[in-house]
């Protein structure tokens, strides 16, 4: 079944490239620019840093009394620096036995969000700039739904999993902190490898989204929601092009941001490859979290008329 689906997608991409070459090139260019201008500068330093810290065993030295430091740095970097650094750090820390499997899964679901720079620099201006009376209040409510509530949910779930002493930490552990240029070289190489794979996923889903939007000019609502959830950047641009009410647009914005798109799931699956964390649990967790936060958004916009 998977092979048949892959063959159908591959054939569709080839045929569409022949019929709509200009649109495919434009979609590829958009995907690469998003990666180069937003993903690469935001994630590369912290991808290198996380790999370097793990290789030098600094985090294991700091976390001898418990895994609170690993949890804290994953949450902070995941929320501040954006997708997919949360899943990347959770996976790396689980590989190094600084987090339990359950803790890594919880953190990858709740801390794997889009950065505030991306949300306030692209998403909200694209959809709501000069269209709502109180734009700042809209920003604060978005921060609440996208960051504060997932943080609270993560804190509640992690309280049950926190261990003061890491009895399960084993494996190849250095006794002392050590740093040399070989560690730095390897960390840089691994950082670029991770982000280049992410670039490939972004481009593929950008092209696929463009093909569907060209073939389906006026899709029904359920297909429209699916298209917008393929890849978030294209999804936000499509959402802005529809003549929808501001309330519905905001609800869909929170849903897209908290879910992360199918492209985000594919990228996370790539990150999970070495750690063997369950992508199925991640999908279930993301869908559940997105539905919960979308429901709360519906209640919010129904009670407070900011549009």
Image: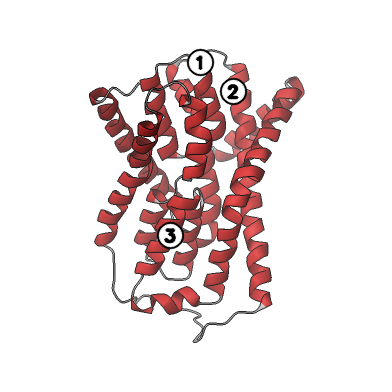
Q: Secondary structure at mark 3?
A: helix
Percent of width and height locating residue 12: 66, 27
> Quick check: marks 3 and 1 in contact, CB under 8 Å?
no
Q: Quadrant of residue 194?
A: bottom right
Indicate whether 25 appears above or below 185: above
Q: Residues within 10 Å of mark 2 (few under 14, many from 20)?
A: some
270 and 241: which is toward the camera: 241
Residue at image coords 57%, 16%: 216
- The spot of residue 2 in percent (x, y) is 55, 39
Mark 3 sits on what residue? 74
Residues 179 and 261: in front is 179
Q: Could you tell me if residue 110 is visible in this image?
A: yes
Q: Mark 2 or mark 3: which is in front?
A: 3
Under circle 1, the secondary element is loop
Mark earlier in primary sequence (2, 1): 2
Residue drawn at the location 40% of the way across and 39% of the way down: 258
Q: CA distance from mark 2 to mark 1?
A: 9 Å
Q: Position of residue 288 (x, y in %)?
A: 33, 40
Please name the residue that numbered disc 2 is placed on: 212
Image point 50% across, 33% down: which residue? 123
Quadrant location of the N terminus? Answer: top right
Residue 111: x %, y % from top left: 41, 51
Using the image, determine if residue 183 lies above or below residue 122: below
Residue at x 53%, y 71% (from the top left corner)? 53
Residue sitting at the far bottom: 175
Return the residue at label 1.
219
Label pair 2/1, CB-CB below 8 angstroms: yes
């Amino acid at each position: 079944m998977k092979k048949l689906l892959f063959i159908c997608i591959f054939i569709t991409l080839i045929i569409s490239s022949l019929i709509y070459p200009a649109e495919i090139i434009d979609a590829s260019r958009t995907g690469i620019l998003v990666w180069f201008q937003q993903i690469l500068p935001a994630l590369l330093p912290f991808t290198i840093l996380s790999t370097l810290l793990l290789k030098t065993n600094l985090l294991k030295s700091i976390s001898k009394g418990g895994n609170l430091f690993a949890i804290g740095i994953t949450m902070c970097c995941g929320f501040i620096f954006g997708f997919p650094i949360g899943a990347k750090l959770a996976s790396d820390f689980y590989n190094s036995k600084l987090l339990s499997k359950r803790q890594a899964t919880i953190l990858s679901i709740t801390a794997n969000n889009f950065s505030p720079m991306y949300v306030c620099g692209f998403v909200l201006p694209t959809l709501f700039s000069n269209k709502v009376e109180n734009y700042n209040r809209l920003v604060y409510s978005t921060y609440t739904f996208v960051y504060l509530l997932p943080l609270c949910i993560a804190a509640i779930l992690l309280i049950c999993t926190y261990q003061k002493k890491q009895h399960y930490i084993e494996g190849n552990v250095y006794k002392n902190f050590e740093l040399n240029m070989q560690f730095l070289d390897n960390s840089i190489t691994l950082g670029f490898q991770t982000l280049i794979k992410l670039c490939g996923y972004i481009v593929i889903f950008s092209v696929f989204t463009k093909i569907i939007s060209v073939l389906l000019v006026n899709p029904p609502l359920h297909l429209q929601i699916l298209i917008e959830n393929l890849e978030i950047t294209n999804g936000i641009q499509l959402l802005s092009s529809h003549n929808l009410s501001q309330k519905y647009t905001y609800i869909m914005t929170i849903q897209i941001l908290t879910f992360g798109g199918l492209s985000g799931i594919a990228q996370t699956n790539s990150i999970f490859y070495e750690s063997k964390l369950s992508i199925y649990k991640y999908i279930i967790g993301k869908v559940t979290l997105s539905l919960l936060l979308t429901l709360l958004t519906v209640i919010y916009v129904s009670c407070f008329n900011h549009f």
